[in-house]
Amino acid sequence: MEVIYQKAFGVDVHKSFIVAVICDSTNQIPKYLKKRFSTFNNDLIKFRNWLLDNDCQNVCMESTGKYYIPVYNSLENYISNVVVANPKWVKCIKGEKDDNKDAKWIADLFKLGIVRSSFIPDKDFRVLR
C-alpha cells in the first residue's frame, strides 16, 4: 500500500493518560517515537509542543468516550490535520492489546490513509452544546 502521510501520529486516549507514537516513514524503514503524557492541562501543552517540535501536522486519535475532547481542543488551533477515529475502525488485533501497540497501530493505519474521520462540529457549535 502507498504511504499517504510521511509523518503520521497516533494517539491512544485514556481517562488519566495518553500514549503517543510518531511514525516517521521518510526512509524505507519507519521509525517510531513513543511518549506518554497525563491528561492534565500542563501535560497536554507539553504534548502539543512535542508534536510541533517533531514537525508533525497529521494526528489521528481514537475517540474513547468523552476523554478525547480536551486532547482535541488543545491541538485544534495548532495542528492542521487532526482526525478523531471511531474505535471500531482502529481496533487492534484481539489478544495483542497494549497501550503502546494500540497507538502504534493507529499511526500505521493513519499513515496509509485507511482511517476515516468522525464528524466534529466547529468550535462555535461545540460551545453551544
Image (cartoon, rainbow, N blue to C red):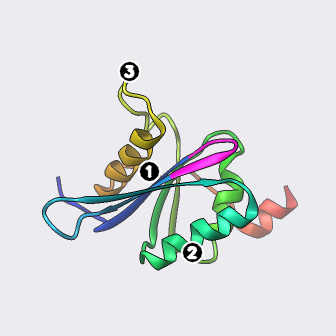
- Residue 71 horizontal side relative to residue 116, left or right: right
Task: Give the amino acid type for the residue marked by disc 2 in the picture.
Answer: Asn
Q: Quadrant of residue 34?
A: bottom left
The answer to whether 27 is drawn above or below residue 98 in the figure is below
Nearer to me, 45 or 7: 45
Q: Pointer 3: what residue?
A: 95
The answer to whether 99 is drawn above or below residue 9 in the figure is above
Residue 24 in percent (x, y) is at 29, 65
Nearer to me, 33 or 57: 33
Residue at 39% from the left image edge and 33% from the top image edge: 92
Disc 2, SS: helix
In this view, the residue farthest toward the left is 28
Between the C-alphas of marks 3 and 1, the distance is 24 Å
Q: Pointer 1: what residue?
A: 116
Q: Pointer 2: what residue?
A: 49
Residue stretch rendered in magenta on the structure: 13-19
Task: Give the amino acid type for the residue marked by disc 1 in the picture.
Answer: Arg
123 in magenta: no
Disc 3, SS: loop
17 in magenta: yes
Between the C-alphas of marks 1 and 2, the distance is 25 Å
Which image quarter holds the C terminus?
A: bottom right
